[in-house]
Image (tube, rainbow, N blue to C red):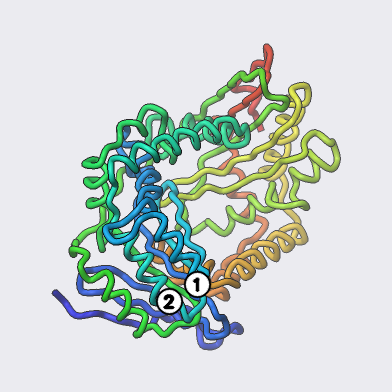
């Protein structure tokens, strides 16, 4: 096997105003990439094992298996029971967690710097040595089926799920992360191990850490735990970008007091050159209390308690959507006013003052979001997985400040086209009908 390769990662111009981030990365002989950021001013260390595939990389019969495996690794390893894992985490005062997304799975732990060795041992053990016993599988199938029911009883979650399933119709990106009541009961031990061995490979993993640590010493500890992981040469291949479906879906559910609304359009992928312009457009549209939708729909008209817009960027595509909850008799007015705001963004150039407010808000969110070791650990992994490089705050700030009112208007015209819009309504809709011409903007 090749030797360990280590490099310091320049992330900032020496003339920039903010201090340099001490980021380094090392490739182990088996191909596992280890990233660290030293933060000597904190007493914590956060570390995470990131798997570079998620629910959108599953076949239809295996929908939900990434999330199922994420749950199952906590049920016991070849050397620890689930109870032992929990007790050892509590003994060192650690915060052990995991999540599954459309494009990644992460197992992470945060501890005091003095507890890094036992924390790393725990994280490596549950990541590398799960048992997937049939008894645990059966129990966890029941747990996840209850989780599916719980989410389906949540109208906010359900309207987003219905929107997504119809927006990315017949594509894995539209399938639920949790799986379904049909797929989850089919998972067995051989299926789990087969999936696990194909996904938990060095070429498909990133191990990141941030906090009060020293790179070389930490890499040596990671190498000692992960050196037995068999080397792989290539990450898993991704499919073609899915085409979006401009659907209109009305789901009638009489038991709901409110109508849940989700209106969306296709948007650029996570690494698109126009991403900062789209983020600013989203911020001005529905990203905060001063946003156009919040001020118009909630403050001026009193039509909704909750209304916002959000970006969902992925590696090869994305969506920008508006969510709101309102009463059935106010739904059509709320939709009309929302479309009016989209039209205004297309026809009128935003003011310098409004753009500056959005830029300051976005910059603030980015800086504040990097204040903890956990957020820096996640930031390292996500930037490596999506960009293969690291962006300094000053570089990002420069890109945000370079966006002009004309850029925002151009993006609004590209995005907010009636023919690509999708709408989902969920609630006690009665005889309500929405046609394509109602989405004109």
Residue 28 drawn at (x, y percent): 25, 74
Q: Can you identify the residue that label 2 sits on?
A: 116
Residue 113 drawn at (x, y percent): 49, 79
Q: Dot 2: few (<14), some (14–19), or many (≥20) neighbours within 10 Å? A: many
Q: Can you identify the residue that label 1 sits on?
A: 111
Looking at the image, which is closer to me, 20 or 114? 114
Specify whether 56 is left or right of 202: right
Disc 2, SS: helix
Q: Is 418 rendered above or below residue 19?
A: above
Disc 1, SS: strand
Dots 2 and 1: beta carbons under 8 Å?
yes
The quadrant the N terminus occupies is: bottom left
Residue sitting at x 28%, y 71%: 225
Looking at the image, which is closer to me, 364 or 305? 305
Q: Dot 1: few (<14), some (14–19), or many (≥20) neighbours within 10 Å? A: many
Q: Is 267 rendered above or below residue 52?
A: above
Residue sitting at x 35%, y 47%: 69
Residue 78 drawn at (x, y percent): 26, 58
């Amino acid at each position: 096997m090749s030797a360990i390769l280590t490099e310091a990662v320049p992330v900032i111009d020496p003339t920039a105003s903010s201090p340099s981030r001490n980021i380094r990365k090392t490739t182990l002989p088996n191909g596992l990439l280890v990233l660290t950021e030293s933060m000597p001013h904190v007493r914590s260390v956060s570390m995470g094992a990131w798997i570079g595939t998620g629910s959108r990389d599953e076949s239809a019969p295996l929908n939900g298996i990434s999330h199922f495996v994420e749950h199952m690794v906590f049920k016991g390893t070849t050397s620890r029971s689930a109870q032992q894992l929990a007790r050892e985490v509590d003994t060192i005062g650690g915060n052990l967690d995991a999540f599954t997304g459309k494009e990644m799975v992460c197992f992470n732990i945060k501890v005091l710097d003095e507890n890094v060795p036992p924390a790393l041992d725990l994280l490596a053990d549950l990541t590398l040595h799960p048992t997937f016993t049939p008894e645990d599988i059966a129990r966890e199938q029941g747990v996840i089926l209850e989780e599916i029911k719980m989410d389906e009883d949540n109208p906010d979650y359900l309207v987003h799920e219905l929107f997504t399933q119809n927006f990315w119709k017949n594509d894995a990106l539209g399938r639920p992360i949790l799986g379904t009541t049909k797929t989850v009961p089919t998972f067995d031990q051989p299926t789990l191990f087969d999936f696990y061995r194909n996904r938990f490979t060095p070429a498909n993993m990133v191990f990141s850490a941030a906090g009060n640590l020293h790179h070389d010493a930490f890499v040596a500890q990671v190498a000692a735990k992960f050196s037995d992981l068999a080397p792989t040469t290539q990450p898993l291949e991704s499919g073609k970008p899915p085409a979006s479906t401009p659907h209109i879906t009305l789901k009638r559910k009489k038991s709901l007091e409110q109508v849940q609304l989700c209106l969306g359009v296709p948007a650029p992928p996570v690494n698109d050159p126009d991403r900062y312009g789209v983020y600013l457009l989203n911020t001005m549209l529905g990203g905060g209390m001063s946003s156009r939708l919040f001020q118009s729909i909630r403050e001026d008209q009193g039509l909704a308690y909750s209304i916002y817009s959000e970006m969902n960027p992925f590696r090869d595509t994305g969506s920008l959507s508006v969510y709101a909850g309102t009463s059935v008799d106010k739904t059509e007015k709320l939709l009309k006013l929302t479309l009016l705001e989209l039209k205004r963004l297309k026809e009128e150039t935003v003011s310098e003052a409004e753009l500056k407010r959005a830029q300051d808000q976005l910059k603030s969110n980015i800086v504040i979001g990097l204040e903890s070791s956990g957020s820096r650990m996640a930031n390292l992994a996500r930037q490596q997985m999506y960009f293969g490089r690291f962006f300094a705050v000053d570089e990002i700030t420069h890109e945000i400040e370079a966006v002009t009112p004309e850029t925002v208007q151009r993006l609004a015209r590209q995005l907010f086209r009636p023919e690509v819009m999708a709408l989902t309504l969920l609630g006690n809709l009665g005889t309500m009908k929405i046609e394509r011409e109602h989405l004109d903007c």
